[in-house]
Amino acid sequence: MSVNEATGTRPRNEAVPGAEPIIVVDNVSKSFGPLQVLHGVSLTIERGTMVAIVGRSGSGKSTLLRCMNALEEINGGTIEVCGNKVSMGDRPSVKRLRTDVGMVFQSYNLFPHLTVLRNITLALTVVQKKSRAEAEAIAQKVLAMVGLADKAEAYPEQLSGGQAQRVAIARSLALSPKVLLFDEVTSALDPELTGEVLKVMEDLAREGMTMVLVTHEMAFARRLADVVVFMHQGKVWEAGPPAEIFADPKTPELRQFLSSGL
Amino acid sequence: MITFSSTHLIYLIEAARWTLLLSVLAFIGGGIVGLALALGRVSQIRWLRWVSSAYIQIIQGTPLLVVLFLAYFGLSILGLDIPPIVAAGLSLTLYTSAFLGEIWRGCILSVPKTQWEASNCIGLNRLQQYRYVILPQAARIAIPPTVGFMVQIIKNTSITSIIGFVELARAGQIVNNSTFEPFITFVFVAMIYFAMCYPLSLASRHFERKLNVGK
């Protein structure tokens, strides 16, 4: 995909043919009891790209993201992340997945009983067995990246929503993941706080982090995503560069979604 | 006629040591088994859930008095001659653990599911999730109901008098039998019970404040 100054897509990591796929979703289906949420979803995400998954509530986009991270068991098809087949029941595979993939949630999910610093160092010391000093150095570094170096000793309840979400991003970053998943990370924030979180995500994208986000921030997706995926009724309805998706929707469903003012 | 004197008071206080000892036995034994039961109840392993649940149902549905009789008289009929303190300790442990197990299960379940997910996503295994994320938060929620139940236990130890313990309530009865001054005797008994229970409430408030960091 070439840079399109007219539509404002960013000049970075142009997806070249034969680029390295990092997540391969193949014909995945998922049901919750009698309710089938994903109907044969296939999607390939390449290293160093930002993929924005958009769609109405109930279209299965968050479920797809959770399946990629083994938070939900899939009922059919396969998901490969960094060459590793994702399966909730397969402990070594999940363990590998956890070192490759970081996830940020809509409700931040910081640990309320721990300081910001400890939220970040917990996995570094407990899982990665790093020394306390080493872990704290990493924590300070990622906190500085999200602009919260002065909040290390604060507790999550003392933070604003935007700050909490940036700490959550820092917590994921500290573990140096290869992919970051963002599940509607700005949906609980007011517009002003949304901006500070999107800024951090933009910085990450520019540094070449592979990012998959489920989002309602259309302007952000349009400006920064390499690929926009429109999901509808549990299927990938349309996918492509933002310029095509936004300017030239192929299906009436996407056209209607875009015109609904989201 | 004998009147209530300092000798009687000292006798009551000495008897209160049994109350205290039995309560401590109940807390320690019941606390350890109760935590195991709580974890068993929320385990991913089906038979563990089933066993813990059955244990809790059976003990909760049986009066402490009957458990005590079974432990003391029942086991001796089976040829196990166990001393009263063991029978009492065992019964109180069974009883306390069933209730604490159920209280603590509720506290564990009240930690939001998203805390499990977030800690899972950063790579913590189940044991680490409990140790660093879930139990510290559950403990904060658990303090008030746990202290409330401990206070009940202190008072419930009086039931062990039926297998021969002269603990505080029984001692009060004995003093009253010799002095015929029920009012003053039982006011002192009540005051000693209060002196044992009130510090628990104070400690509870202290811990709640201490654990409510960041609020």
Image (spheres, rainbow, N blue to C red):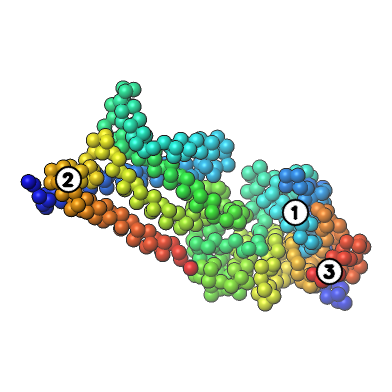
Q: Residue at x 73, y 44 (%)?
A: A33
Which label lies toward us, 1 or 3? Answer: 3
| Disc 2/disc 1 C-alpha distance (Å) | 74 Å
Asked whether residue A128 is in view, the answer is no
The front one of A53 and A157 is: A157
On the same chain, marks 1 and 3? The answer is yes
Q: Identify the mark at residue A86; answer none if there is no mark.
A: none
Q: Secondary structure at mark 3?
A: loop
The front one of B84 and A165 is: B84
Q: Secondary structure at mark 1?
A: helix
Picture quadrant where residue B84 is located: top left
On the same chain, marks 2 and 1? The answer is no
Residue A159 as seen in the image, left or right of residue A40: left
Q: Residue at x 79, y 50 (%)?
A: A38
Characterize the local packing of mark 2: few (<14), some (14-19) or many (20 or more) Cα atoms within 10 angstroms.
Answer: some
Which label lies toward us, 2 or 3? Answer: 2
Q: Residue at x 46, y 44 (%)?
A: B101
Give percent across and percent down for residue A216.
Answer: 76, 67
Give percent across and percent down for residue A198.
Answer: 70, 72
Q: Earlier in the sequence, mark 1 or mark 3?
A: 1
Going by the numbered disc 1, the residue's amino acid type is Leu
Circles 1 and 3: CB atoms closer than 8 Å: no
Position of residue A231 relative to residue A73, above or below, is: below
Q: Secondary structure at mark 2?
A: helix
Q: Identify the mark at residue B176; answer none if there is no mark.
A: 2
Picture quadrant where residue B210 is located: bottom left
User: Residue beneath label 3, please?
Assistant: A260
Query: Which quarter of the image is occupied by the N terminus of chain A?
Result: bottom right
Characterize the local packing of mark 3: few (<14), some (14-19) or many (20 or more) Cα atoms within 10 angstroms.
Answer: few
Asked whether residue A188 is in view, the answer is yes
Going by the numbered disc 3, the residue's amino acid type is Ser
